[in-house]
Amino acid sequence: MRNKLFAILTIMAATNLAMAQQADVQTAATPQQQTNAENTALTVDDVTGAAFAPEYMQSVTMMADGQHYTRLSDSSTSIDRYSLKDNNCEGPVVTAAELGVDEIDDYQLSPDESKMIIRTATKRVYRRSYQAVHYVYDLKTKQHFRLSDLDYEQVPLWSHDAQRIAFVSAGNLYVTSLSPQPQTKQVTDDGKYNEIINGIPDWVNEEEFGFNRAFAFSHDGNHLTWIRYDESAVKTYSLQMFGGLNPKREEYVLYPGEYSYKYPKAGEQNSTVTAWTCNLTTMQKQKFDLSLADDDYLPRILATSSAKYVLIYRMNRHQNRWDILSADVNTGKCTLLISEEADKYIKEEAMEMTQITDGHILMASDREGTMQLYLYDLNGKLLGKLSDAKYGVSEVYGYDEKTGTAYYQAAGISPMQRELYASTLKRTNIINSTQKGGTHSAIWSKNFSCFIHTWSDANHPYIYEICRADGRSQHVVIDNKSLAEKIEKANLPTKEFFSFTTSEGVTLNGWMVKPTDFQKDKKYPVILYQYSGPGSQQVVDSWAIGSMGRGGLFDQYLTQQGFIVACVDGRGTGGRGADFEKMIYLRMGELESRDQVETALYLGSLPYVDADRIGIWGWSFGGFCTLMSMSEGRPVFRAGVAVAPPTDWRFYDSIYTERFMRTPQENAAGYDVSPIGRAKDLHGALLLCHGLADDNVHPQNTFEYAEALVQQGKDFRQLIYTNRNHSIYGGNTRKHLFTQITQFFCEQLKAKK
């Protein structure tokens, strides 16, 4: 939900912002792109390049004094220190040149702020995992050294006393002790690719439980604890790799190769998980006694303020029970502190938002119908409810032990907006600066005396400012004024929000973008974009709005081709409580597609819409819902584009799919309601797009669906992108994809019947 490139099949609202950010990094603005930004007409280069990219603050870390923060420079060549009082840059803490590297990718300050781990030469593995080179830099002596002599390290972590750093390499855990001289010890030795992983999650746990580090120190740093994944019995999926051109893979130029990895599909064997502890003085290891069922998950292992205990999350395979256990690092004994149960499923976001503080557990739960915060002590005793946001808490920033105040983001006014709140067990206060609409987020100082406030709405890019605790602005850091002026000069259309009621009596929210020369007495073709995945939200008052983020830039580009572009969040999406979100349980795709058909019928009733020229498109779950909607039975869509779509949930991973559908063995009828199952009912022109190296939604989905269409005598078009993953980018790829989508809709929808 935060800065995730295509957090597909989880929460797409965060996805749009993340995707825009990655595109900004990947593509520098060329002089031609800058020129395009100053013209009145957008181009595909503008959409995929950086001409309309907003400024961001990246890798911000608040310092312990409550007066300063550090930040990675826009050029990624230094880590700079700033004053929170006036945002004055006090100079670089360290530069890439000092380390002898070209760029700094990220960093971690040590708990005592005397040193930092600096990451460079990062190579992405999956969505959250990476391999990189790390340096340890001493802020006092200005000396630095490589964290290890291994080829790479993954997810390094400081001990609380800043004397040790743990990391993973090639499936094994290591610990580097800094005193008296740096020395690295290997903690595990059984790591083996596609068999055993220590300390980082396997593919499916990383993707669907939203984390990349599965180890923690005890508070005194004397014990290292971790989750071990035995994936040797998990079935392998292989992606075929070719030579390609950008980049070119010389080893595959003549004969294709393959990338094989363990991927448990719905109902299939998962990794066997265990949790372990190691005394770093004696190097004696011991398994935690977790009383695990054969198919239980361990979604987190977390440090506490105690030298004796860590916390371990345990979840059953149906994902409707979540246990928080206290684990003794000395004996391996585990004690149940909190057990949460749900009728249908427990959202992954609940675990992501739950925080362990020095003296409390700040737990997120939708047990009362919306996501709220509950305060427990470290013995698992419920002390009370901290929030009462009408539409639920969406992000948690921290808990002040001194005042008993929780700081968080929530939808308290509208499902489409986000405000900032401060709550104790007795009262809740909205932060003053966030009473206006739009979307507000925060990075709080360590002592909660001030915060960096980010605001945007659907028609205004991000503004970053330093605010006092009550929300009063002290200093604007980034205002994106030049981008706002560029947008105004380009005469881009604005987004409008609307709602309507379906024939089933369900009220749905949407947004619409019309051509700038819109004429109310003219009939326009419509392109309906949607994602529709469980808990996702596309209809939000944020600059992350739109099919590809950036304030809906691609959607605005489509309006210049003569289309109205609209988007509606149907049943199953987020921001409207557990009942609305979870009503799709065991029948994913049925209600979502019905609501998109109802949307088309509503739009077709508007006096300025041509009901015979309505198209639909989406990516990932949005591609799935596109296909389901085009074969729902009511022929309302003249054309559709499905990018990287799941076409049968039996092909998708175990954790995500079973959360909403249980297993195919338990719910065969639910799984049968799929695009493949509905292939004979497809209506309208169709364009299918998929990357051949998609490790998330395998190209198998598109290939098998295409075969089903062929056997049903259905016409369609298909685009396959060599060596591209789920996000389909790199080189000229994204530009080509967007060009093809645009041309397809122009061909199919511009001409009247």
Image (spheres, grey):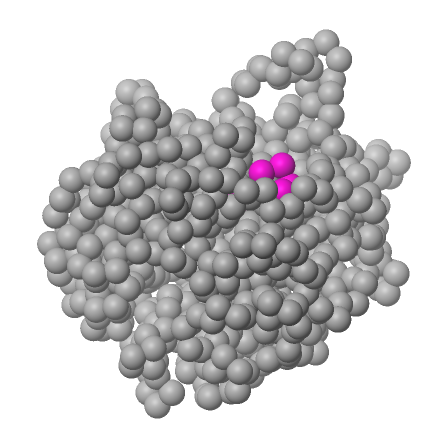
Direction from residue 692 to residue 521 in the image, left or right: left
Residue at the limit of the structure toward the top, as seen here: 254
Residue 13 location, x and y as percent?
Answer: 48, 55
| Residue located at (58% from left, 54% from top) | 282
Confirm whether the magenta stretch covers residue 304. Answer: no
Tell how many labels: 0
Q: Residue at x 28, y 49 (%)?
A: 114
Front one among 463 and 340: 340
The chief SS type of the magenta part is: strand
* Direction from residue 197 to residue 93 in the image, left or right: left
Q: Is residue 97 above or below residue 492?
A: above
Quarter assignment of residue 294: bottom right
* Relative image position of residue 605 (x, y in whole percent): 55, 59
**Magenta residue span:** 167-172
Horizontal and vertical percent position of residue 78: 26, 35
In the rendered image, which quarter contains the C terminus? top right
Residue 560 vs 507, above or below: the answer is: above
Q: Residue at x 75, y 67 (%)?
A: 292
Q: Is residue 113 above or below residue 360?
A: above
**Can you see residue 81?**
yes
Left or right position of 386 against 188: left
Residue 210 is drawn in which quadrant?
Answer: bottom right
Q: Is 168 a magenta residue?
A: yes
